[in-house]
Amino acid sequence: MSNQTSHALLKRARQLLPGGVNSPVRSFASVGGDPFFVARAEGSKIYDVDGREYIDYVCSYGPLILGHAHPAIVRAIQEQAERGTSYGAPTEWEVELADEIVAAIPSVDMVRFVNSGTEATMSAVRLARAFTGRKRIIKCEGCYHGHGDGFLSQAGSGLTTLGIASSPGVPDEFAGLTINVPFNNAQALKAALEEYENDVAAVILEPVPANMGVVVPYDGYLHEVRQMTRDHDVLLIFDEVITGFRLAYGGAQEYFGVDADLTCLGKIIGGGLPVGAYGGRRDIMQLVAPSGPVYQAGTLSGNPLAMRAGLEMLNQLKRPGIYQQLEETARQLVDELQKSIRRHGWPLRINHIGSMLTVFFTLSLVVDYSTAKRADTERYARYFHHMLDHGIFLAPSQFEAMFISTAHSPADIEKTAKTQLAVLRMML
Ligand SMILES: *Cc1c(COP(=O)(O)O)cnc(C)c1O
């Protein structure tokens, strides 16, 4: 336990950090109340400075697929730290991790490591623009690709209108280069590709969106997107920052049997340290400096600490049965939750795929951003706080995923299901 309470730390933090945090969702702004400050974490559990224990389904928003402080990853980090944390010169670990990624994702021939998912998507778009000589991109509403200017763009009125800035500080000229279409709507994408024929560099999407809550692509959607981008000679960028090494070892591309031209990675491949990567076809990647003219660089990119944490992570994920185990644990949780929802006729819907899920407070199908937004966020906020009070840490927003790790035990799942039943009974 720390000698400072969450309450005291938050008071100080708010004087020193905007909103008291370094990433907005952590502030609990969309559920109300104050965040707890973390003292430590291990396996499926996270402990706050006030001495409370929670079963953690946030898992740092995706990276911690083996749970917190996995011994093998801790060992790799410790070993490397003693040899130096960054050299500004190449190491074998960059080559090894690149080799693992190239072997895991057949559409990726070469990679460039960066330090976050945001950097990966921004750089991939720059590269796509350079490769095609075109300036517009198409993205799906509700998909998150980090905080790059061009991604903070929301749909204007009408299906294929130019985007408008979704944050102050983003010039409309930047946001306007991004066209927003609904996810799971091949018709809308077709219309946008036709309207901006010869002007679109790339279509970028999360193959399984997890940043409007989990949304599952309908059967064949990703294949249609692949075909359409090919027909229009537009690059397809899969943002697999969450799905990479989570849905399957080879990510969404393995899971659905679809190839992208460029792939963005992050989260899991850093083993819990800050890493991102973008990669893809050799003829495209060779345009990146210094082998080509497209500038992109990073002081700490590919640093050995992050590379070794990531390598150990992938090493662990290659053990047989890991993805089946994740899938079974998630299935057990979803089944338990569904059972009580169905029995009581509660107005909830669970979207689930692999080891990620979202409990939406709505009866309508959630297939895209506009249907996700129908969820009752006020109810979610109450649910979140009751679950937290009972030792279950869910994402402090309706529009995030619950992540299952290999550290979640049957006892964790049982406790979570029991708690949810009690909480919903009280609430609904
Ligand atoms: C988290 C995330 C990002 C941004 O990654 P950061 O490391 O937070 O910059 C990009 N795309 C997706 C799909 C993400 O989930």
Image (spheres, helix red, strand yellow):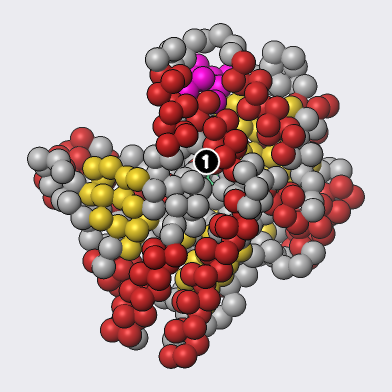
Instruction: Report if residue 100 lies within the magenta region.
Output: no
Percent of width and height locating residue 419: 33, 74
Residue behind label 1 places its C-beta within 8 angstroms of ligand 1: yes
Instruction: Report if residue 297 lies within the magenta region.
Output: yes
Camera-nearest residue between 334 and 17: 334
Residue visible at 43% across and 60% down in the picture: 409
Residues in magenta, as a range: 296-307
Badge 1 amino acid: Lys
Question: Relative to 94, is 254 on the left or the right?
Answer: right
Percent of width and height locating residue 146: 52, 43
Camera-nearest residue between 406 and 371: 406
Camera-nearest residue between 254 and 61: 254
Residue visible at 59% across and 61% down in the picture: 327
- Kindly report the secondary structure that dominates the magenta region of the rendered protein: loop
Which structural element holds mark 1? Answer: helix
Residue visible at 46% across and 33% down in the picture: 73
For label 1, the crowd category at 10 Å Cα-Cα, with few meaning under 14, some 14 to 19 and many 20 or more, is many
Give the answer, above or below, for where 98 lies relative to 200: above
How many numbered markers are drawn? 1
Q: Which residue is mark 1?
A: 267
Give the answer, above or below, for where 427 lies relative to 171: below
